[in-house]
Amino acid sequence: MALAVIIIAAANAFGAIGCSLNDPDRDIKRLFPNATNYKTDFISIKDTGGQPLADEIQQKLGDKFEPVYETLDVPYAFYTVLKNDKLLGYVHGVNQKGRFGGMQLIITTDPNGVITDFYYQRISSPEAKKFRDPAFAKQFIGLTLADFYRHKPQAEIKDPTEKSNPDFKATIRGIFKNLILMDEFKMNKKFDSVYIETKKQNDSNEVNKNENKDSNTN
Amino acid sequence: MFLLASVAAAVAAAEQPTEFLYKELNVIGGYSRNNGLVGKNRYMLKNSAGFEYFRKFSDQYGDHLTLDLQVRYSYDSAENSKEAHAVEIHNAWLEYKLGLGESLIIGHFDPAFGLEPVVDTHSSLLQTLAMHSLGYTKDWGVGYKTLLGDFDFQIAAQLGSGMPLYYYDHSYMLTTRIATPMQDGQQLGLSFAYGQTLTFEQERTMPAPDLMNEYSEQKKLISLDYQTPLGPFGFKSEIAVGDKEGDSVGGALAEVSYTLPDNQNITLKLQTTYWSDNLKDSRMTDGTIAPVVEYKINNEWSFRTGYFHDFKAMAEKDRVILLQLYYYGL
């Protein structure tokens, strides 16, 4: 009978890993044509810094982690791209909650953390085609985490869709989170000085705003 | 010898390895209209516990070697005490990288045929056509993967025995698959299989299972598989046709999935499968439609339930409800 062939099949090795590349060799070759190989690291927030690190990342992101896609124990796959033993750049993907399920956002950076490419490995959306349009993705090229801390892309990059604004906002958030993780795990917190400077500025703006509000009330 | 020497060199040169040890628990059961409570060997639905050990070896020039070992212990209370305990080896492979996009694999791994090597059937209730076409999902042997221009290419030479490491009656299986690269979630694959496979009464590695037939069965198969996102839906399909011991065989599978936007822990799936062991004889056909609900309790625990309705059956049509609780975590 038909059901007799149902078995519980073997698992894929990456069953519990957050957003690894579908076809790493082909993807790396396409993204870095001069690459000879890459090194894969699996890093989790839980093993690296636990709850204090999670709190720090959420503070930088300005948002809480989502309980399905962003648990602390999920290992993130980081691909360090090499030409022989010379560093060419990094590839990293994150899972991000979208309107119709998980999105997988992949970015590549040069060794200094400048985005050299961005694409959706997975997106479920009635307007997926507009998100996958190279003209939209191109706007992220050249940006760094410093730009996200200064809210430049959040203010300047426009939603390419008519009815999928939540997925657009999720994309911006996902790329921001992706860059923060890359900075934490691979770039030795290179952009922390920008974060601190921007935070001070925002705090001081907030204080000024409150003072003005108080004086107007009086 | 070359592979073993390369493996030894890669291990010796490795920097701090990346490794994981996942624990796994599978509790499954259900109710069949024909057979009452199920969950025993009749449906090959065995409760099991096991682990998966995964390790990557790298040096300053990048990754060289990957190891994966996934083993489960299962207990089947319907068998006598000697037969009830079993060890199932699922993944047991070493992959050695020859260059970017090129590698050799040895051990127990997916044949290069159909959807099975490219979809995640991670303990899912819904499977591919592999159990109908080849008779198993993984086999022992060697394989080679490379990038052929714009296509992904893989080839495997395996024992034709499936889960047990078993050679008998000149059994073997050669498979090859060529596919477009996975782009925007889309992939089209074309595969061929040629060989002689063994059929066993039990699905296990140790103790060695009993042969169902005292001979290996000749198979020649061709398969076309396709997967793509369709707006908010996921779609997978597979068609396979060929010849088994002189009989024309064939079948198809289609599956649609949808994740609830407002509760993304829940995914709904609908799969229909059709398989004929003799395309000229309508009595030799299995056909099932199965809606399944998957609920992700958290990152480690999942609950799945499905209703399997036979619209065609070689033996007796059945209707079955299955429930599964599954754990996979570090």
Image (cartoon, rainbow, N blue to C red):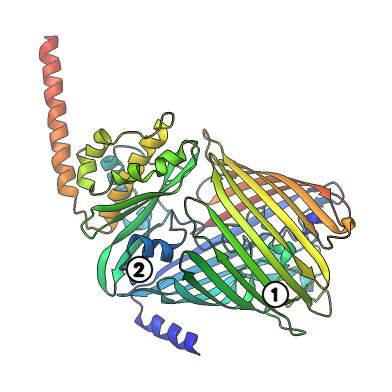
Residue denoted by label 2? A39
Res A189 quadrant in image: bottom left
Point out the residue furthest to the bottom here: B1
- Residue B194: give its label: 1
Left or right of residue B6: residue B124: right
| Residue B262, visible in the rendered structure | yes
Residue B165's place in the image compared with B311, above or below, is below
Left or right of residue A103: residue B120: right
Picture residue at 67% right of the left edge, 54% below the top: B27
x, y (%) of residue B5?
45, 88
Please report contact status of discs 1 and 2: CB closer than 8 Å, yes or no.
no
User: Label 1 is found on which chain of the structure?
Assistant: B
In front of the other: B107 or B203: B107
Residue at mark 1 to residue at mark 2: CA–CA distance: 36 Å
Please tell me how crowded label 1 is: few (under 14), some (14-19), or many (20+) other residues with Cα within 10 Å. Answer: many
x, y (%) of residue B300?
52, 52
| Residue A173, visible in the rendered structure | no
Q: Is mark 2 on a helix, strand or loop?
A: strand
Point out the residue furthest to the top here: A218
Res B58 quadrant in image: bottom left
Picture residue at 67% right of the left edge, 57% below the top: B128
Question: Do callouts 1 and 2 point to residues on the same chain?
Answer: no
